[in-house]
């Protein structure tokens, strides 16, 4: 079921790349249209899965990845439609396509643990996935900032210089994405802690809940990620760390996010694998 | 109607001759009006810039148009024709269309892709249109050229990248700061180069402009020119600490801004970048200042390199722009063909309608018994039949792929339906045998 969105995302990615290279407005509009169609098809897939398991499909790693991709596509579309700036598409689409391939290759089975039938679970995961989507955008904005910064600094105004928005705009968008992501990350972590305490009282024998501690890699890396982004927010507001420093921090943070989201979720954690 | 173009440009004539044939410094409107009185110039537009003087006419007699336009140039500018005829170039029809499209696109400009020309083409057309010297052909042609110019600018990089160092500096500032509104500028030195750059920044919307110069009088003059403020020379470092953009162009033999000074005033973690444009030779700013994290330092040579890169990038876009010109030429030619099909279509329509009316007239007596509603219905039905019969041939005729086919089709239709003037229209008797039994029963 995840294949159709994947194909549409890939097609949008190719058209975004052509648009980036050739800068023809009609091609850009075609790219946006394809991405809208992909997001629509993806919405349908996620809707179907929600009806199937009677909660938003988050608990299996592949389905969580699929939901993350969906949120990232929607967040990017929001950014594009509000700023009328399509140059970032070519940087975002590889993440979208690469991650969407996972649920296609490993569909996984959504877990039906009754512990998950809780609005807390929904709030916890959706906050975190939305935070991750914001961080993905921030990382790509940071990456493009660095590419452009390098061209201007080295006085070789080349490929990216003619195609990307100004450094100021990239930095401002990066800042907004990091702050929004940090807020949702904080909410997600707090909700997770509160919910774990509640669920433990209800299901004292649940092995997942027992494993929920700072020693679990998933929880540990999530806290480190939170620390990285808190540092980024603090240094920007209090010390004026903008530009390249902020870009590096948002890239580092997103590496942590991906690490936690993929290898740790799939192979390492014991706390977050509900059966 | 033929299109004809005659003129001189930077490609065919030296600057002194172009100056003598220039219309823009005199009353361009009067020139177009005087041109419009010539019999061969049914429609005319005069395009005159510092690089070209071109006359576009729609004429029924292109050979005569050439003679009359040459005579017009000679009379209007009071020059013997022999002094400029070797430098004239001319184009007919398709070549004239291509030329105007290339001009509007900036492909024929001295600096490829320069932006002013499209506005100049628009002004030239407007001047002629205001004096009712244009008609359907030139009006369509010029509006089409505006579309070509716009397409080339939005779809190719032909007009991209600044090609003078002043504009290159402003473009860089925009790439660093986005909008320049509210950005503070410090200008050090108040000579010619500083003035030019400061003016560029002012027109690009920069915020407060501070001018520091050892010569107070010069600083004050520049401050007035760009609505800025003077800054005492001793406060230079304070000005540097609050500036976003610094322009330096003094005659000093030693650096005025050193790395130690910049480090002292902007601190290590300055949130906003500092863009320093060093226009002076020898340089006013120590080269190592550019190594600081948030500082972008460009000197004259750097800006020259940017300009050269932009020029070569523009040249690499020429092919794509030419492709757009060719594409639009094909569309324009199709429009012209559809337009030349109009007389045939109209004649065919009139012919069919005449037959329809004469048939109704012939049946008038038999239709007399019908109610007014039924008669109106008969009228309506016959009209619709004619419309439907004509719909497809009309579309086909307007959409023919080339001129040759069009001539053949038009000729065939003219013969098949005897559309030429003077040929007799078939009278009611000639078609009487074609009335079917069903028609008779209907009456």
Image (cartoon, rainbow, N blue to C red):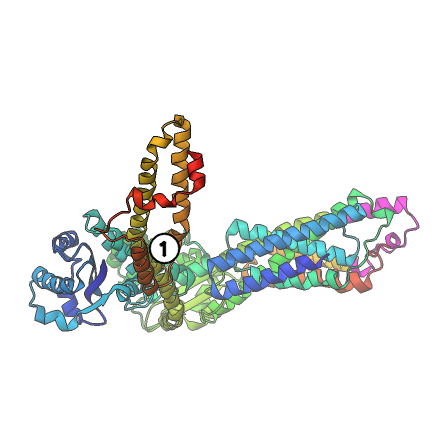
Q: Residues within 10 Å of mark 1 (few under 14, many from 20)?
A: some
Q: Can residue B359 be seen in this view?
A: yes
**Percent position of residue B290, x then y:** 46, 69
User: Viewer-proximal residue, B304 or B147?
Assistant: B147
Element on which disc 1 rests? helix
**Percent position of residue A16, x then y:** 55, 61
User: Viewer-proximal residue, B298 or B86?
Assistant: B86
In this image, A238 relative to B154: left or right? right
Give residue A5's quadrant in the image.
Answer: bottom right
In this image, B378 relative to A34: left or right? left
Q: Which residues make up the magenta segment?
A: A192-218
**Percent position of residue A43, x then y:** 68, 50
- Counting labels gives 1
**Percent position of residue A169, x then y:** 50, 55
> Which residue does the image show at 31% across and 66% down from the upper left?
B250
User: Viewer-proximal residue, B232 or B328?
Assistant: B328
- Is residue B94 shown in magenta? no
Chief secondary structure of the magenta portion? helix
Q: Where, quadrant-wise, is the N terminus of chain A in this rendering?
A: bottom right
> Which residue does the image show at 21% across and 63% down from the upper left?
B5
Residue situated furthest right in the rendering: A205
- The image shows residue B233, relative to residue B370, as above or below, that is below
Residue identified by numbered label 1: B398
Q: Which subunit holds the residue at mark 1?
A: B
């Amino acid at each position: 079921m995840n294949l159709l969105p994947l194909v549409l995302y890939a097609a949008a990615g190719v058209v975004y790349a052509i648009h980036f290279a050739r800068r023809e407005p009609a091609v850009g509009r075609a790219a946006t249209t394809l991405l809208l169609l992909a997001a629509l098809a993806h919405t349908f897939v996620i809707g179907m899965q929600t009806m199937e398991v009677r909660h938003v499909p988050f608990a299996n790693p592949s389905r969580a990845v699929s939901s993350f991709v969906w949120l990232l596509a929607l967040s990017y579309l929001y950014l594009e439609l509000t700023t009328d700036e399509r140059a970032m598409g070519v940087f975002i689409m590889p993440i979208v396509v690469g991650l969407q391939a996972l649920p296609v290759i490993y569909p996984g089975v959504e877990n039906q643990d009754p512990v998950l039938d809780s609005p807390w679970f929904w709030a916890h995961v959706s906050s975190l996935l939305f935070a991750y989507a914001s961080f993905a955008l921030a990382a790509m904005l940071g990456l493009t900032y660095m590419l452009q910064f390098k061209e201007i600094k080295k006085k070789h105004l080349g490929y990216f210089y003619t195609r990307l928005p100004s450094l100021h705009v990239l930095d401002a968008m990066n800042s907004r994405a990091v702050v929004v992501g940090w807020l949702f990350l904080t909410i997600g972590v707090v909700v997770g802690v509160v919910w774990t305490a509640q669920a433990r009282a209800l299901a004292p024998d649940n092995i997942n809940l027992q494993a929920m501690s700072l020693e679990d890699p998933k929880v540990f890396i999530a806290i480190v990620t939170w620390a990285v982004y808190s540092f980024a927010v603090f240094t920007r507001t209090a010390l004026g760390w903008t530009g390249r420093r902020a870009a590096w921090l948002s890239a580092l943070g997103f590496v942590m996010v991906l690490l936690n989201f993929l290898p740790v979720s799939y192979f390492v954690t014991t706390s977050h694998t509900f059966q | 109607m033929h299109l004809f173009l005659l003129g001189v440009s930077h490609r065919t004539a030296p600057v002194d001759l172009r100056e003598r044939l220039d219309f823009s410094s005199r009353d361009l409107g009067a020139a177009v009006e005087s041109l419009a009185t010539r019999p061969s110039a049914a429609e005319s537009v005069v395009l005159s810039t510092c690089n070209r003087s071109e006359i576009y006419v729609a004429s029924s007699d292109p050979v005569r148009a050439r003679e009359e336009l040459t005579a017009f140039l000679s009379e209007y500018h009071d020059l013997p024709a022999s002094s400029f005829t070797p430098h004239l170039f001319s184009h007919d029809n398709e070549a004239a269309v291509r030329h105007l499209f290339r001009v509007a696109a900036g492909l024929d400009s001295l600096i490829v892709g320069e932006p002013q020309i499209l506005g100049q083409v628009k002004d030239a057309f407007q001047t002629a249109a205001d004096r009712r010297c244009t008609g359907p052909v030139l009006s369509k042609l010029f509006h089409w050229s505006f579309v070509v110019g716009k397409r080339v600018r939005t779809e190719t990089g032909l007009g991209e990248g600044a090609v003078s160092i002043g504009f290159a500096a402003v473009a860089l500032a925009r790439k660093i700061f986005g909008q320049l509104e509210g950005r503070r500028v410090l200008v050090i030195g108040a000579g010619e180069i500083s003035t030019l750059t400061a003016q560029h920044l002012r027109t690009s919307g920069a915020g407060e402009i501070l001018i520091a110069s050892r010569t107070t009088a010069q600083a004050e003059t520049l401050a007035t020119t760009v609505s800025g403020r003077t800054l005492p020379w001793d406060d230079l470092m304070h000005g540097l600490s609050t500036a976003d953009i610094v322009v330096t162009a003094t005659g000093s033999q030693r650096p005025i801004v050193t790395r130690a000074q910049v480090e002292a005033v902007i601190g290590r973690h300055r949130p906003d970048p500092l863009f320093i444009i060093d226009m002076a030779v020898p340089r006013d700013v120590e080269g190592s200042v550019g190594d600081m994290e948030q500082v972008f330092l460009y000197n004259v040579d750097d800006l020259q390199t940017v300009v050269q890169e932009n020029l070569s990038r523009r040249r690499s876009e020429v092919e794509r722009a030419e492709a757009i010109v060719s594409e639009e030429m094909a569309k324009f030619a199709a429009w012209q063909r559809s337009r030349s099909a109009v007389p045939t279509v109209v004649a065919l329509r009139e012919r069919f309608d005449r037959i329809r009316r004469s048939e109704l007239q012939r049946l008038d007596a038999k239709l007399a018994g019908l109610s007014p509603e039924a008669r109106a219905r008969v009228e309506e039905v016959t009209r619709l039949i004619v419309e439907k019969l004509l719909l497809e041939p009309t579309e086909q005729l307007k959409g023919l792929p080339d001129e040759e086919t069009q001539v053949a089709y038009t000729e065939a239709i003219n013969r098949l339906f005897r559309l030429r003037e003077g040929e007799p229209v078939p009278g009611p008797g000639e078609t009487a045998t074609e009335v079917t039994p069903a028609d008779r029963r209907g009456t």
